[in-house]
Amino acid sequence: MEQFVDRELEIRTLGKEYAKKEASLVVVYGRRRVGKTTLLSEFMKGKSALYFLATQEAETINRAAFQEKAADFTGNDFLAEVSVDKWDTIFKAIVSAKWETKPVLIIDEFQYLGKANPAFPSVFQRIWDEILMKSSVMVILCGSLISMMVSQTLSYGSPLYGRRTAQIRLKQIPFRYYREFCPALSRKGQIERYAVTGGVPKYIESFSDCTDIFAGIEENILNRTGYLYEEPHFLLQQEVSEVGGYFSVLRAIAFGRTKLSEIASFMEAKATDLTRTLKTLIELDLVHREVPITEENPEKSKKGLYRITDYYIRFWFTMIYPNQGDIEQGNITYVMEKIKKSFVRSHAAFVYEDVCREELSARQDLPCHFSKIGRYWDKNTEIDIVALNEEEGIILFGECKYWSGQVDVDVFYQLQEKAGRVPWHKGSRRELYCIFSMSGFSARLRELAESRDDLILSE
């Protein structure tokens, strides 16, 4: 069982739906291994709950398995023995039973029922309208195939559209909760672990016995029999029909081709031919399009860059995919040496910047609230963090240093010089500066920060 961490909002949402006197229908979805079953297991505690895991087998087999579960759940011996050829019969038996508390019905991997029978969402819509909606029952439809869950339960074209009372898209756990998984690790160790596993509980669990990040990589990822070695293939094969094109896009982005034109050139394809692929990767939470935080119309901006948001996928395409030939031949020591040499520069330092942005957004000691936090770049300037308070005209510039040595005053002066090139409200804005360092700050920089009210140091 995965360790239960975070998910306060999701538990509150489920609790609110459960507290309703009338029926409730909740859709829970998100990528594999992100902790949906663990969330539902936690919510089920102390409740009258039926949990059913649908499979990719025929609808008749799933219905028979559900019937058996329902018979046991209700204590209905007749339901256990009778031959049932309609789902309606099973759900009628459930709501007709006497319950001291509101029953909870959970159908996990719901999309497989629709995959086995494309008409099943319509069947379930009728069951909801005629049977479940009129009863005091809570129904949770859960699924891992995002595209299919959206099309079967959430999209306008779905028969179930408009019937849900809540939906939860479960995403990865933020870094601020990571210490609950790995309390014995140093901050540096936690960031290194997070840079590989991201906030996917199953990945974190796989690394739980590894005190050294590189030993964990060798044991869990370079091991060809482990699930993480083929994980990107598995994730995409479940969602898309042609994996090759998606792999090429992810590889291009991992190799630093972040502009649409650069990705197209890398693939020797037309930019217009990549629109659908990128849109799908964004919907799957694997990629996102980023623009400078000061852009007034982000959707129309021509400065958009594409980044891989899933840290494990980014690590895999940066460190594993290019070396698969050597891994297959058993040259693990050689590959590990390559990973060790480039891990910080090519991967961990970028993740550290994201961690710093997340931590900045949660700080309570800042002089104001920043509604927008991101990065800034133009042809000549790149700034790790820029945060905006548009109402008060306050802008914060941040630098993130994943160095082994202390950060000195020159970093601040360089940041100050770069800040002067950012045109946002120039001449009328209030400027603040924040420097993040993995290894602390020099005495000179600390003294400088004490003498200024616009400089914040964070480690």
Image (cartoon, rainbow, N blue to C red):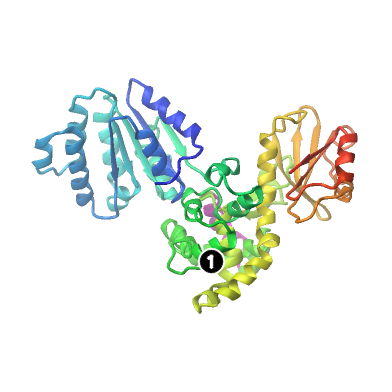
Q: Position of residue 29 (x, y in %)?
A: 43, 43
Q: Quadrant of the C terminus?
A: top right
Tag 1 secondary structure: helix
Q: Picture coordinates of residue 175 (x, y %)?
A: 60, 44
Tell me the amino acid under the disc marked 1: Glu
Q: Is 197 situated left or right of 66 in this image?
A: right
Write the residue at 26% across / 40% down: 123
Taking the view exactly as shown, the residue that stands out farthest to the top is 21
Q: State which quadrant residue 315 falls in.
A: bottom right
Q: Residue at x 50, y 67 (%)?
A: 244
Q: Position of residue 303 (x, y in %)?
A: 73, 51
Q: Which residue is mark 1?
A: 218
- The image position of residue 378, as x and y in percent, is 80, 52
| Identity of the residue drawn at 82% across and 52% down | 381
Left or right position of 283 against 157: right
What residue sits 41% from the left and 50% below the top?
145
Q: Characterize the magenta stretch by its predominant secondary structure.
A: helix
Q: Is residue 99 above or below residue 452?
A: above
Q: Nearer the viewer, residue 74 or 163?
A: 74
Q: Nearer the viewer, residue 97 or 331?
A: 331
Can residue 61 be seen from the camera position used here? yes
Regarding residue 268, the answer to whether it shows in the image is no
User: Residue 152, located in which quarter of the rendered image?
Assistant: top left
Which residues are drawn in magenta?
269-282
Q: Is residue 318 shown above or below 46?
A: below
Q: Is residue 281 magenta?
A: yes
Say which quarter of the image contains residue 176. top right
- Compare residues 169 and 426 and report the one nearer the observer: 169
Label 1 Cα neighbours within 10 Å, binned few <14 / some 14-19 / many ≥20: some
